[in-house]
Amino acid sequence: MKPTRIRAALVSAALATVLTAVGGGTAQARQSWDEAAVPAAASGGTPTTGRNSCLSTDGTDLNALLTVREQIIGPPACRVAVARKPWVRSFPSWGTAADAASAVYPADYVPSVPKPQDDFILKFLGVRIVQDIGTPHERSFTFGPEVLQLVVPFEGLPFATFASPALPGLKSGTHTTTVFMRLSSEHCDGLGTDREENCLPAGEFPYTGDTPFEVVKRHA
């Protein structure tokens, strides 16, 4: 799987910028998880009466990778769930420098532990997932560090991947899901010295935008 990572350029509370990590960790290509169109009912990643299979852009089966049986909602190709069936929210992975020796930070930042990925894991408190934010049907679900599933190596860098516990099924129609992350203190990834690009703030902050997805009736 080619992991995605999110930079902490928190220009507004409604949108966080997602980047694809390529070329040894240099963020080159922007991916819009948040604004991608909801896929048509026949597109890849659409649930059927068989086994759920959410495929990343390189063909990796995220259900198998994350050991998730329910339909995954998150990547642009995985934006359709079956009405009244539980679903799981996945969201962009977070990558860091490989080790303390290669890490670079803003001038006044000192990690709590030497290895950047361990620093992130130590400070990661969990997430709040908001369904249909800003509508009369808004509902929040708060989870702890258990949403951090595993660390996946890619081009020499470690990436933390995420998946929520199963969330309650929804009525058919268009919905949104928004992820807010919580850290005990500021974390910087060790990949650069720009605080807006390379660091996540303490407390709760928006980690994704309002990601749209479609809930459809089960096929006969």
Image (spheres, rainbow, N blue to C red):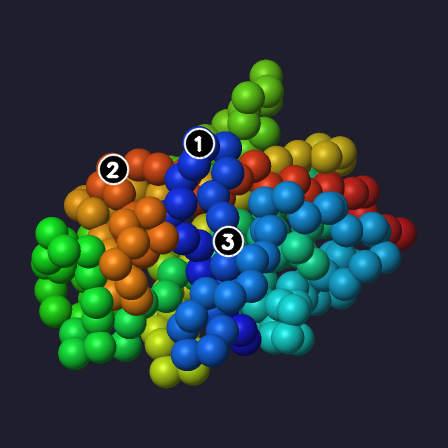
Which is in the foreground here, disc 1 or disc 2? 1
User: What is the quadrant of the N terminus in the image?
Assistant: bottom right
Amino acid residing under circle 1:
Ala
In the image, farthest residue toward the right: 220
Q: Residue at x 75, y 34 (%)?
A: 173
Residue marked by disc 2: 203
Residue 168 position by quadrant: top right
Specify the farthest residue to the top. Answer: 136
Which x, y percent locates residue 142? Answer: 37, 38
Tell me if residue 171 can be seen.
Answer: yes
| Left or right, residue 175 beside residue 185 | right
Residue 127 visible in the snapshot: no
CA separation, marks 3 and 2?
20 Å
| x 11%, y 52%: residue | 108
* Helix, strand or loop under label 3: strand
Q: Tag 2 or tag 1, which sits nearer the N-term? A: 1
Identify which residue, 135 or 110, lies in the foreground. Answer: 110
Type of residue at label 3?
A: Val
What amino acid is labelled 2 in the image? Gly
Q: Compared to 205, does 82 lie above or below?
A: below
Q: In front here: 28 or 66?
A: 28
Mark 1 = which residue?
Answer: 13
Residue 3 has which mark? Answer: none
Mark 1 vs mark 2, CA separation in Å: 14 Å
Residue under pointer 3: 18
- Rendered location of residue 128, percent (x, y): 39, 38
Q: Which of 57 and 129 is in front in this view?
A: 57
In the displayed structure, 195 sits above or below 104; it is above
Q: How far apart are marks 1 and 3 (CA)?
A: 14 Å
